[in-house]
Amino acid sequence: AASTAPAPAPASALSPAPVPAPAPATPPVADGPTAAAEAAAAEAAEAFGELGEAVAPEDVLPGDRRAAEPLKLRPWRPNGAQVALVPGGHDREVSEANKLLFVEKLLDWRLRGSIAGPIAAMREGLHAVVPPAVREEARRMLSPTEVHGLLAGMRDIDVEDWRWNSRLAGGLSAASQEVRWFWQIVRQWAADGRQDRMQDLLQFATGSRRVPVGGFAQLVGFNGGKHLFTLAKGTHLSAQSLPTSHACICTVDVPPWVSFEAARQKLSSALEVGRGRFDEGHAAGAGRNGDD
């Protein structure tokens, strides 16, 4: 119905994407893993109720420990479920007369209602690990924007800060043509206002599209220690290869490019291939994987 909205995964613990048909398999034994999964699904359906095609906001899982127990998820629906934005919304159509109400309720659901449970769980976890005195002091010292920066990093990328806080490995030097071409490409993106391309590159190299508070000097590796962005000579790569990345150590291996244009095309192609995140699943497009 037009007065409903797709239910996001956190709200219903389901994905609205179609479920692929299972491959033919031999019938499982009664006490096998499939039977156990079916029993768990039946128990979950009894505990939380199976979702219909249209559900109400109060059908959202509570987000507590009970809901997070293994396999305590509602059974999948082949076509997902929709949320009734108003009582009886599944029987109402959007019209010229009620379209503003529809937009208002849709925004409220997307920005507040659908994430109320996860936000409450995050608040509970924060209160469990951060003493009240520390929280009160942080509230006095930090604005919401600053807290956001501490948690998620900064969106805007300063290419000169990036280049200054980087290192070279594998025999590369500042005079190496691969290094000069690499930074020429990145500077051109900056000059063209292509923050999105620089964010793609940062994600390709580090796994994150954002710069930590304090700039590139504060990049960290897989063990939580500081690890500057690194360009390494790709001795295992040919001139036709794409650059490869090691996000756990903030490193990009560059091939022995034969020209600036080849370098630009290969670097751009690598970003297109590696831009999918682990949490995007099939929505990101099958076959798009990062290096590590």
Image (cartoon, rainbow, N blue to C red):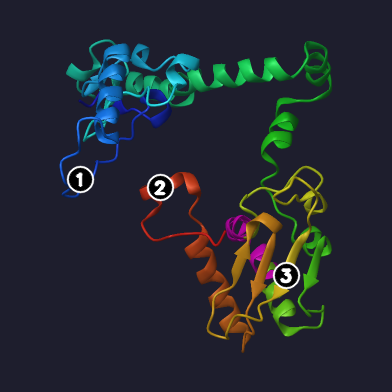
- Displayed quadrant of residue 142: top right
Residue highlighted by disc 3: 231
Dot label at residue 281: 2
At x 30%, y 35%, the residue is 33
Relative to 87, say whether 20 is above or below: below
Residue 64 falls left or right of residue 33: right
User: Do residues under tags 1 and 3 come within 8 Å of each other at their CB atoms?
Assistant: no
Q: Could you tell me which secondary element the residue under label 3 belongs to?
A: strand
Dot label at residue 22: 1
Residue 73 falls left or right of residue 42: right
- Of residue 270 and residue 244, the one placed in the foreground of this image is 244
Question: Where does the image place residue 120, in percent across and percent down from the top left?
Answer: 55, 16
Sequence-wise, the earlier of marks 1 and 3 is 1
Residue that lies at the very extreme toward the bottom in this rendered image: 258
Which span is picked out in magenta? Answer: 187-204
Dot label at residue 141: none
Dominant SS of magenta comes to: helix
Relative to 85, say whether 190 is above or below: below
Tell me which amino acid carries mark 2.
Answer: Gly
Is 26 inside the magenta-drawn segment? no
Question: Where does the image place residue 160, in percent across and percent down from the top left?
Answer: 79, 62
